[in-house]
Amino acid sequence: MTADATRTIEEREVSEWWATGLTRIAPGEIELRGYPIERLIGEASFVDVVWLLLRGELPEPEQARLLEAALLASVDHGPQAPSIAAARMAATCGVGLNNAVASGINLLGDVHGGAGQQCMEVLAGIRDRHAAGEDLAEVVADVLAEYRSAGRYVPGFGHRFHPRDPRRDPLLGLVAEAARAGIVAGEHLAAAEELERALASGRARPVPMNIDGATAVVYAELGFPPELGRGLFVLARSVGVLAHAWEERQGGARIKGPIPRRLLAAYTGPAARPVPER
């Protein structure tokens, strides 16, 4: 085998190490899923390209409209959200803007930021059982019984602050409209609405869907797997994290802790005591 042939094999091994079907680059050329970037610029929206990279093709306008609505609805929920608060606190510590944003994003996990993915999984299970022939109301009753017996909240429903999440109705309205037009099947929407009805049954106050539940319906109806549903939430919330970190930096405050400086965290340890002699 010649040196040139060996080099060709080695080069191919190296170039295939991070092989990708997403992006092709060459001197003066960039293609996303086969589309030249210069043709996408000005013709496609950011949401179109999000769909393109994640799904392989450009979305239909109605699909892009639904995805954009869900992303927009999730961008921010104020500085009391842990991810936002962490980013703002980091921004006062002199770190770079990227570090402040990363501090906030890294707080998005199962407890804070994970309910959308969890709700998508619940809705998919209900949808699958109903598609297999089980009665929808009975399936939902089974699911609720499981959560109640375990003492767990159903992800995507109820809100600690909003009696009725203002983002619910417009998002579900868009999904219902898309279902009537045949753009989405509406099966996850039906599962979520039945779950909402069952949760409200026998209660003085209903337990409506929150932003996690409403966006779970959108992402599931659009065919995104649950894990990507969480990724899309992180993508959307990164806008709010960035804006809050930037705003805090402009304020000029340094090293802001979790509570105002004149206050101290309550101490619950032992009273002051002498160090024993040794």
Image (cartoon, rainbow, N blue to C red):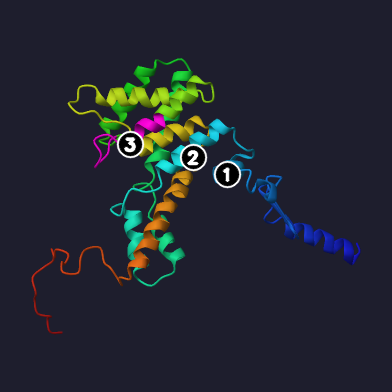
The tag on residue 45 is 1
Answer left or right for 8 relative to 87: right
Q: Label 3 vs label 2: CA separation?
A: 18 Å
Residue highlighted by disc 2: 68
| N-terminal label among 2 and 1 | 1
Residue sitting at x 33%, y 36%: 210
Residue sitting at x 45%, y 38%: 69
Residue 244: image location, x then y, percent: 37, 58
Magenta run includes residue 28: no
Q: Main secondary structure of the magenta part?
A: loop
Which quadrant: the C terminus? Answer: bottom left
Compared with 28, 66 (above or below) is above
Closer to viewer: mark 3 or mark 2: 2
| N-terminal label among 3 and 2 | 2
Query: As shown in the figure, which amino acid type bears the numbered disc 1?
Result: Ser
From this viewpoint, is residue 106 visible? Answer: no
Which quadrant: the N terminus? Answer: bottom right
Residue 241: image location, x then y, percent: 40, 55
Residue highlighted by disc 3: 210
